[in-house]
Image (cartoon, rainbow, N blue to C red):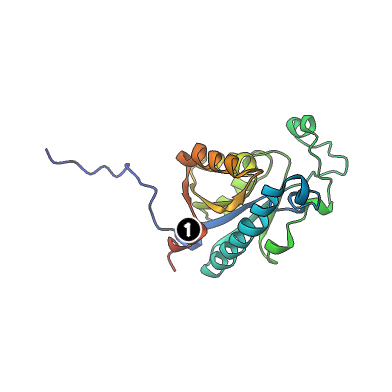
Amino acid sequence: MTETFDPLRLKRDKRLDPKRTAVFVVDAQNSEVTPAYRHEKPEYWAAVHDRALPAMRRLIDEARAAGCEIVYTVIEALTRDGRDRSLDHKLSGILVPKGAWEGKVIDAVAPGDDDVLLPKTSSGAFNSTNADYVLRNLGIDNVIVVGFLTDQCVDMTVRDAADRGYYVVCAEDACATHTDARHRAALKAFGGYCRVQTVDEALSTLNR
């Protein structure tokens, strides 16, 4: 019996049009590199500095040169006392006041003059920002997600983007969380919502 072609049977191995692709940088901010983490969370500190930030920088630079949009989110309240935060952030004691150093993007992966920066007060970027509105206006279909933490804000951003109809790639070496075990478990858990690749593999799929 001859198999009939079904155009709706899509695959995750498509090539990406840079003009319709955004690198979505999740919470790569100073609160994730506070000096105390060097001693309190040494495994995380090493993953961030030795692997994730260099990989992220390479992805941002090469994707921008290819014509991709670069969109950043940071955890930062719209007010100094954080009264606008989500209930979860209030219960969890997460507060980055408006304008605080902790809410600035890490210098090593700082935005360009014309990149998009969206402050948020929830784990999922699509829940407390107008990210979907902005991406639609930019003509974006494909989102390459990177950032911190793999098993929290990155996880939710990947799943939410997929549910909204974006084609999602997670560049795994440009993400990190507090332990490598947690990082690997998260990639396995949300891998069904995206294409998990290295930065080099993701860049190789851009039509350039």
Which residue is more in the foreground, 29 or 166? 29
Q: Is residue 39 above or below residue 58?
A: above
Other-residue count near label 1 (Cα within 10 Å), few / some / many at <14 / 14–19 / ≥20: many
Kind of residue at badge 1: Ala
x and y, in percent, of residue 5 in the image: 23, 44
* Residue drawn 77% across the image and 45% down it: 40
The answer to which quarter of the image holds residue 152 is top right
Q: Residue at x 65, y 38 (%)?
A: 127
Viewport quadrant of the N terminus = top left
The front one of 175 and 135 is: 175
Q: How many marks?
A: 1
Horizontal relation, residue 35 to residue 118: left or right? right
Q: Secondary structure at mark 1?
A: helix
Left or right placement of residue 37 versus residue 191 in this view: right
Residue 157 visible here: no
Residue picked out by circle 1: 202
The residue sitting at the right extreme is 81
Percent across and percent down for residue 139 are 52, 55
- The residue shown at (54%, 64%) is 63
Figure check: 152 above or below 74: above
Which of the two residues, 18 or 186, is positioned nearer the viewer here?
Answer: 186
Name the quadrant of the C terminus: bottom left
Q: Position of residue 111 (x, y in %)?
A: 69, 62
User: Position of 52 compared to 203: left or right?
Assistant: right
Q: Whole-percent x and y of residue 155? A: 58, 40
Front-most of 137 and 79?
Answer: 79
Q: Residue at x 32, y 42 (%)?
A: 9
- Can residue 95 be seen at all in this image of the molecule? yes
